[in-house]
Amino acid sequence: MLTRQQTEQLLEEVLIARSETDEAECKSGTGEALQHALCAMSNRRDRNGGVVFIGVDGNFQMVGIADIETTQRVIADWTAELFNVSLRVVPEIINHAGHSILAVIVPPCPPGHRPCHFERLSREEVLRSVHAIVEHEGKWYPTPTGLLFFCNEPQRYLPQSALEFLHLWGPELTSLGPDNSRWRLNRELSGTLPQIITEAEALLLERIATRGIINGFRRHDEPEYPRFAMREAIVNAVAHRDYTMRGSRIQVRLFPDRIEVHTPGGLPSPVTVDNIEDEQATRNEAIVSLLQDFGFMEKRGYGFNGIVATMREAGLSPRKSALLH
């Protein structure tokens, strides 16, 4: 969970940038938007959760709270009764520029209860609200999104949703190893999209090299490639692939000198390789929304820009054409 110091630092960053982040949101008062913000923050996968600043308006101006005690009681009631799991939030009163605001620090939802959702909705209503089911002739049927997130065996109905992980011997697909094989590992990853993303990330971390970093008198190992960049490349491929295309799968290719992530369907229009850092588009709105709720994606279109930025910070070439096809 975020500390008070981290929370105050986040507030400064939000006010200076005049922009919310994946970790921090601003609300001028209580209401339905605040309820949804609390729910969204609890679904972040980061172990720190997030924070909602109450008393900051949509223009990122400090407006304060007239009655902090009443606001605290309202939030306490919501977090105890409104959701499928009680949220053990920590309210912190912060005085800033002559105004008192309430920083509601939200811990991550326990894994066994994820995703957090409104308890007042029935199971059917929850699934319908995330476009996991659709009504046809008086009966409810799963959508492709529903299958990809909530089915025990999604590949039984959508075989193209599996991911192929290849660890190659040499710099080309045709390179051969000492035993004349083309790959060190060729594994098909199946299950729900969150399961596939998690397993692909784990395989990469298990198989890439590490480098030792000296910090003072201590040494720690870091992955050869930034973890954020690897994870975001996989998440973007899963989120934006064309699931109507049969006979092809997402491929993660680990070469000795690079990682390639190939996704069927290419980039969604109007995004191209040349404008990918500036243009945004979403092919699968429902899938992207659920990946955000599960904490795999940010809500601000930062994913690919984040890949490029972290690669450059690590002194590596982003190689856009190699990261996402």
Image: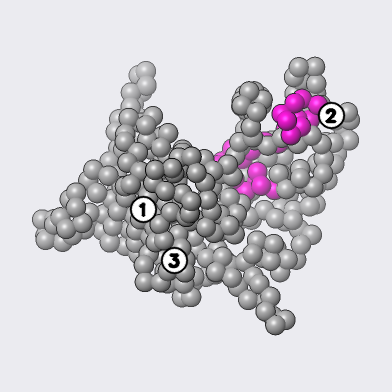
The answer to if 324 sits in the magenta stretch is: no
Per the image, label 2 sits on a secondary structure element best described as loop
Rendered-image quadrant of the N terminus: top right
Label 1 to label 2: alpha-carbon separation = 49 Å
Label 1 to label 3: alpha-carbon separation = 16 Å
Q: Identify the residue at image location x=36%, y=71%.
A: 247
Q: Identify the residue at image location x=82%, y=44%.
A: 31
Query: Percent x, y for residue 49?
Result: 61, 40
Query: Percent x, y for residue 100?
Result: 80, 23
Per the image, label 1 sits on a secondary structure element best described as loop
Q: Amino acid at mark 1?
A: His
Label 2 to label 3: alpha-carbon separation = 48 Å
Q: Nearer the viewer, mark 1 or mark 2?
A: 1
Residue placed most toward the observer, 151 or 243: 243
Query: Percent x, y for residue 279?
Result: 50, 44
The answer to whether residue 150 is above or below residue 46 is: below
Residue designated by label 1: 325
What secondary structure is the stretch in magenta mostly built from? Answer: loop
- Mark 1 or mark 2: whose residue is earlier in sequence: 2
> Quick check: can you spot residue 203?
no
The boundaries of the magenta stretch are 39-63
Q: For mark 2, does the 10 Å Cα neighbourhood hold few (<14), some (14 to 19), or many (20 or more) residues?
A: some
Q: Please indicate whether residue 151 sits to the left or right of residue 106 in the image.
A: left
Q: Please indicate whether residue 132 sits to the left or right of residue 119 in the image.
A: left
